[in-house]
Image: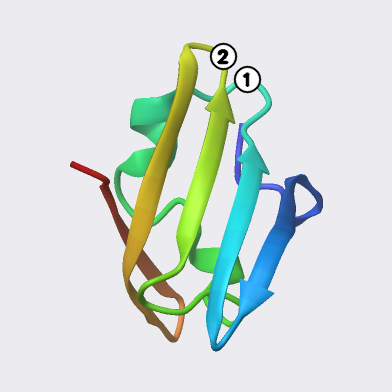
Amino acid sequence: MAFAIRNLSVLAYANGFTLWHYKTGKDTLDTVSSGNYLADASDMLTAGDLIMLTATDGARIVCVTLADLETVVTAPLS
């Protein structure tokens, strides 16, 4: 299943930081966390934002490390 913008929602926003939630549908955490899965939201996301992911195989919080024109890169919080 591909990224669905309707499954991305803002939980909190302050001082240029946004906390997001994304429900993946049928995709796994590895699918969402790898590659450029969130590219369609590149105009909404900013480096430093956090995304809470809910997937078929669990949940994870990732940090947006790069959000540029049609590119979104995330990294899991350590």
Cα gap from disc 2 to disc 1, whole angstroms: 6 Å
The residue located at (37%, 48%) in the rendering is 62
Q: Secondary structure at mark 2?
A: loop
| Label 2: how many Cα within 10 Å (few below 14, some 14–19, many 20+) | few
Instruction: State yes or no: discs 2 and 1 in contact (Cβ < 8 Å).
Output: yes
Q: Nearer the viewer, residue 15 or 20?
A: 15
Residue for badge 1: 26
**Where does the C terminus fall, quadrant-wise?**
top left
Circle 1: residue type: Lys
Tell me where residue 12 appears, x and y as whole percent.
Answer: 68, 64
First-in-chain label (2 vs 1) = 1
Which residue type does callout 2 highlight?
Thr
| 54 sits to left or right of 34 | right
Q: Is residue 13 left or right of residue 34?
A: right
**Residue occupying the point 58% across, 82% down:** 43
Location of residue 65 in the rendering, given as x and y in whole percent from the top left corner: 28, 69
Image quadrant assignment for residue 48: bottom left
Identify the residue shown where x is 66% and y is 73%. Answer: 13
Residue beneath disc 2 = 56
Q: Is residue 32 above or below residue 40?
A: above
Relative side of 42 to 78, left or right: right
Quadrant containing the N terminus in the rendered view: top right
